[in-house]
Image (cartoon, rainbow, N blue to C red):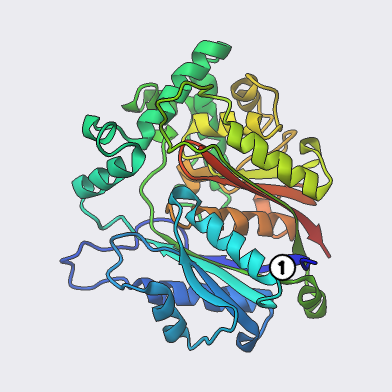
Amino acid sequence: MPRSVAVIGGAAVPCGKLMEKPDAPIQVLEHEVLSRCVLDAVRDAGVEKSSIGSLVFSHPRIYTRQLYFATFMAHYLRLPADGIVMEVLGNGMTGGLAFDQAVDQVANGKADVALALGTSFEMGADTAAHLNNTMRATGDVDFQSSCGFTPIAWYAMDAVRYMHEFKATREQIASVAVKNRLHASHNPLAQYRKPITLEEVMSQRMIVEPLGLLEVPPRSDGAACVVVATEDVAKRIGRPYVLIRGRGFHHEGAHQISEVPGDMTAFLPATIAASKAYDEAGICAKELDFAEIYAPCTIVEVCVSEAIGLLPRGEGAAAAAAGVTTLGGEIPICTSGGLQSRGHPPYVTPLYNVIEALEQLRHRAGTRQVKDASLGLTICELGNYNAALVHVMEAVG
């Protein structure tokens, strides 16, 4: 019988520029940054170092010089483990898979305490080389990549289709960026914290029509660590914790961009994964107090909010413009500031989302706190939501 699992601690560095150019005389070292996160997260959790039984790392970006980063970090931290020391990789879901595997380690009795942790450094990398690597990951390397297809291009196609199908306006979709910057202005981990107006969003240069500069994610560096444990351990510590109530995953068997015709804006994997998580948790979407969504672009947040049942199909953009998803609204979404403003260090972005959920459910989010938050959701994707991973969490204590 799987054991109940709690999230008991977490820490991250503010998103932004950490990585220097390869020829810079002084370099920021990933293992030093991450080790500080580990110390802060373990202190936040209230556990002893000796109790940690498993370390699940998000695989570092290709720009990380240190190979076998997980075992190097175990050595650097002087952390022996009986459960597992491993790295996982899955595009934008990488950090989510690290968290999911750490939860599994605890649920299945491999460890009483486990860490999900990692770094994602890319801002010192050459822009052209980075773009080339991104294009090679987007679709068929012999078909889409040669045409210069990028992730923002597929999200832009989603936006055009959504506007066509549901008569949504670009202003409504752009309002998501304004809302997220408002939330980010209250988040010390956010990369961009200065509030913006809808007029500012609309006046920015286009990245891929109809998505402008402030509607897409910035390049970001980051590092994060989340501590999970059995509920028995959490109870013994005697601090407020967050219980994993439900989990769902679905992959549709397509690689990000598919030649098979389908509904571009339904994000069916998110619907299926969320349904599994709701069923396991014994709740419905309307019972959630907030959701932290992995949404690189404004349109993604709109589509996912509908796919997981927070808003009716075709009404997500209008609801965002009306303030429904803003703090104080009916269902606050991305209280961290989202990927456009909180920042997007891709391989650890889902860990930042878990940390935001942890802060909200322990009522430690300060001026961005969702009042009386007791149930929250995190969701992440592999690419254009060809797959989704959902966790439903509940406040305890």
Residue 75 is situated, as x and y percent measured from the top left of the image, at 43, 85
Position of residue 390 measured from the top left corner of the image (x, y, whole percent): 64, 47
Q: Which residue: 50% across, 49% down?
A: 342
- In the image, 62 versus 23, the foreground residue is 62
In the image, 54 versus 153, the foreground residue is 54
In the picture, the quarter occupied by the N terminus is: bottom right
- Whether residue 350 appears in this view of the structure is yes
**In this rendering, does residue 289 appear at all?**
no
Q: Is residue 330 above or below residue 163?
A: below
Asked whether 335 or 81 is in front, the reply is 81
Number of marks in the rendered image: 1
Q: Position of residue 275 (x, y in %)?
A: 72, 39
Left or right of residue 304: residue 27:
left
Which residue does the image show at 38% across and 63% down from the upper left? 60
**Residue 345 falls left or right of residue 133:** right
Residue nearest the observer in this picture, 388 or 351 = 388
At label 1, counting other C-alpha atoms closer than 10 Å, the crowd grade (few under 14, some 14-19, many 20 or more) is: many
Judged left or right of residue 373, residue 390 is left
Could you tell me which quadrant the C terminus lies in?
Answer: bottom right
- The quadrant where residue 29 appears: bottom left
In the picture shown, does residue 3 fall above or below 295?
A: below
Determine the secondary structure under disc 1.
helix
Which residue carries the number 1 mark?
107
Q: Residue at x 35, y 59 (%)?
A: 61
Q: Is residue 177 above or below residue 230?
A: above
Q: Amino acid at mark 1?
A: Ala
Q: Position of residue 309 (x, y in %)?
A: 71, 32
Q: Quadrant of residue 112?
A: bottom right
Is 56 on the left-hand or right-hand side of 370?
left
